Amino acid sequence: MTIAEYWDDLVTTALLGTDRRAVPTPPPGGLADLAADAAAARPSTDAAAALLAQVAATTAVRRAGVLPGPTVAPLAPPAADERPVTPPGASHTWERLVADWPVLEDEWVLAVVQAGRRLSPELVTPLLARHRGDRVRHARVLVAAGPLGQWMVEWVPALGCTARAPMPEAELLERMAGLPELPIVPQLATLCSLEGRAGAATVAQAVAGGLSAGTLTVADRAVLVNLVARLHPSVLLPLSAALRRVDPSRPAIGLALALADLAALRHHLLAELEPA
């Protein structure tokens, strides 16, 4: 009887139960000697205990006889990336904007690239997985991730782009380098070109003043979110402050405070990712 055949007998006995089938006798050799030594050290009439002892002994013998497999080449690390990593706080900023203001994520990734930085390693996998269905965003993440991103896609193909629609390379590069257009009504779209102190005053009057006067309401939320996401960075903090001063009794106070948070967060992410 071979060790393999004996193991099959043990399994059969375990399935049927020792009350219906006797514990099989081990084949001659080391396994039988081990069983005899165990029985001598701990005499017992419990067939189930004897079966478990034989299972343990046979498992040890089977594993001891396993030969090592062929040598596997060590995993090659990704190529070096000399760009500085995004600061630790940027990871928390990304988590916050994804949860609260995903409209800012495109600008966040683009800011990483334009600042000459690379994604912190713990962000590479979630960002690749999050945008694998969007060819432009996935390609932008790969640029921000650098060699580590390509390395991850090679070893985990599920992180690769799954978009089926083809796109010419020139168009892909052009769209990667800029932010997608967001729908903004014409009378508000002109505010996007304003900057500096004078521009900030005009923007604050139009947005915060409009919410206070009732000319802008919660029905305009989507358009106002898009507007704040595309305003010049220099007007964001003054706008945030003006929105926080909206009369709490106004119906749109909730929207005003939400837009204030959006403006402050956008200013923060841009300042945090300034070129190293």
Image: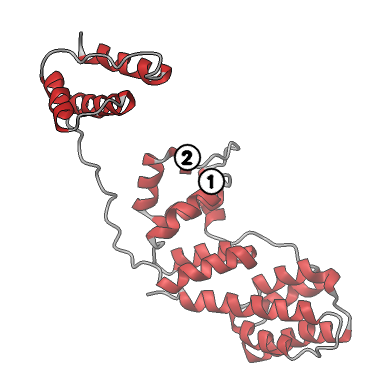
Image location (x, y in percent) of residue 231: 66, 75
The residue labelled by disc 2 is 158
Q: Secondary structure at mark 2?
A: helix
Front residue (pair 153, 276): 153
* Residue 73 screen position, x and y as percent: 20, 36
Q: Earlier in the sequence, mark 2 or mark 1?
A: 1
Residue 271 locus on image (x, y percent): 49, 79
Give SS at disc 1. Answer: loop
Q: Is residue 163 left or right of residue 72?
A: right
Instruction: Give 161 or 196, whichever is nearer the viewer.
Output: 161
Which quadrant, please, contains the N terminus? top left
In the picture as drawn, the residue positioned furthest to the right comes out as 214
Question: Type of residue at label 1?
Answer: Arg
Question: Which callout, 2 or 1, points to the residue nearer the camera?
Answer: 2
Residue 156 or residue 169, whichever sits in front: 156
Which residue was labeled with disc 1?
132
